[in-house]
Image (spheres, helix red, strand yellow):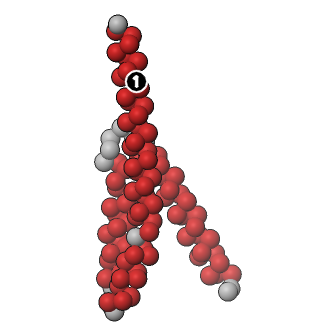
Amino acid sequence: MDISALSVILLAIILFICFIFLQYYLSKKDNKWYGIIIPVIWFFAATIVAATSGLLMTFILFFFLLNLPTAAYFIIYAVCRENLKKKKLEISKVNIQDLD
């Protein structure tokens, strides 16, 4: 492996980590649609790349491999939204108790 291949792999890893942090940040926003932006764009991009692969088996392999980050982004989204729901529920319980 030469230095240019290693630098491309390192850049890809750094970009993926940046996207994970961005997904986490967007998923914690009050607007639920912000957290869906990255997984949807990634899904369509992965599908287009897989569709240009040519052979059916290559398409299937590329489709599943390239959509692994999509699954990771949706898991981050689901966990963040669930935590946000729990916090809102706790706040509403405290507000109700304050009224009594």
Viewer can see residue 53: no
Residue 78 percent coordinates (x, y):
39, 49
Q: Residue at x 38, y 30 (%)?
A: 88
| Local SS, label 1 | helix
Give the residue type at disc 1.
Answer: Ile
Q: Residue 60: percent from the left, percent from the top? A: 35, 83
Q: Quadrant of residue 98?
A: top left
The residue depicted at 64 percent of the width and 81 percent of the height is 4
In this rendering, the count of numbered labels is 1
Horizontal side of residue 61 vs 1, given as left or right:
left
Is residue 23 depicted above or below 49 in this figure? above
Residue 15 % position (x, y): 53, 64
The quarter of the picture where the C terminus appears is top left
Q: Which residue is mark 1?
A: 91
Q: Residues within 10 Å of mark 1 (few under 14, many from 20)?
A: few
Residue that appears at 52% across and 63% down? 16
In the rendered image, the vertical position of residue 19 relative to residue 96, given as above or below? below
Q: Residue furthest top?
A: 100
Q: Is residue 64 above or below residue 18?
A: below
